[in-house]
Image (cartoon, grey):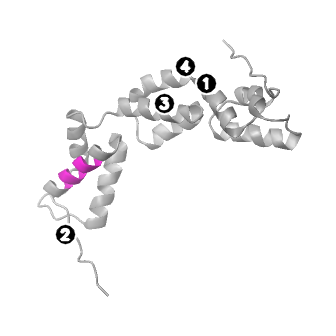
């Protein structure tokens, strides 16, 4: 039985290399990068002469353009919208990624503009309303509305899509 040799603790150079590897592989936000670096320091320990200044490293990478919270928010909200998620679910995802409200402006505008389209995608994916083969019974209707609500859509939008007859796509409200 062979045992792995423990990896040496991180120092400033290895921490910077780990951060660069991470941002080169993944689209990320400042908050997610900071959490990643904190986890790495916790796992491997710190062997540097000075305490690790993780926020400064994250800000330096952001200043160099490797991390852009505003662009990440737009990209993430577009991806979630394409999957049919609503505004509440998208906002929660951005909040969990550490995106500040000031960096969400473009993403919020995009989500607001595509709310109806995202609901249609969700209805199609879940095969409800116009994409169902039959009208749901009351229990199925409640479950479908609950699924819409968990996906982050408003009750009014959920009800309009779930109550639509099979084959009849509801019109978007202006």
Seen at 29% across and 59% down, the residue is 40
Residue topped by disc 3: 78
Q: Position of residue 106 (x, y in %)?
A: 43, 23
Location of the C terminus (image quadrant): top right
* Labels 3 and 2 touching (C-beta < 8 A): no
Question: How far, Cα to Cα, is label 4 from label 1?
Answer: 9 Å
Quarter holding residue 61: top left
Q: Residues within 10 Å of mark 3 (few under 14, many from 20)?
A: some
Callout 4: helix, strand or loop? helix
Callout 3: helix, strand or loop? helix
Q: Nearer the viewer, residue 56 or 148?
A: 148
Callout 1: helix, strand or loop? helix
Q: Nearer the viewer, mark 4 or mark 1?
A: 1
Task: Name the outermost residue toward the left.
Answer: 49
Is residue 43 left or right of 168 when viewed as pictured?
left
Question: How far, Cα to Cα, is label 4 from label 3?
Answer: 11 Å
Is residue 19 left or right of 77 when viewed as pictured?
left
Q: Position of residue 43 (x, y in %)?
A: 31, 65
Quarter holding residue 165: top right
Question: How far, Cα to Cα, is label 3 from label 1?
Answer: 11 Å
* Labels 4 and 3 touching (C-beta < 8 A): no
Residue 16 part of the magenta-drawn span: yes
Seen at 63% across and 38% down, the residue is 151
Q: Residues within 10 Å of mark 4 (few under 14, many from 20)?
A: few
Residue topped by disc 1: 117
Question: How far, Cα to Cα, is label 1 from label 2?
Answer: 51 Å
Residue topped by disc 2: 8
- Going from N to C along the chain, the mark reached first, 3 or 2, is 2
Q: Which residues are magenta?
A: 15-22
């Amino acid at each position: 039985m062979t045992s792995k040799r423990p990896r040496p603790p991180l120092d400033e150079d290895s921490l910077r290399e780990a951060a660069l590897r991470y941002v080169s592989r993944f689209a990320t936000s400042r908050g997610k990068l900071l959490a990643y670096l904190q986890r790495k320091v916790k796992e491997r320990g710190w062997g540097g002469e000075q305490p690790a200044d993780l926020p400064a490293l994250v800000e330096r990478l952001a200043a160099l353009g490797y991390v852009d919270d505003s662009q990440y928010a737009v990209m993430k909200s577009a991806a979630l919208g394409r999957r049919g998620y609503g505004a509440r679910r998208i906002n929660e995802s951005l909040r969990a990624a550490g995106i500040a409200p000031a960096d969400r402006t473009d993403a919020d505008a995009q989500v607001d503009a595509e709310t109806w389209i995202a609901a249609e995608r969700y209805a199609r994916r879940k095969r409800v309303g116009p994409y169902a083969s039959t009208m749901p019974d009351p229990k199925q209707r409640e479950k479908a509305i609950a699924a819409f609500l968990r996906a982050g859509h408003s009750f009014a939008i959920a009800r309009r899509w779930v109550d639509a007859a099979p084959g009849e796509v509801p019109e978007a409200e202006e």
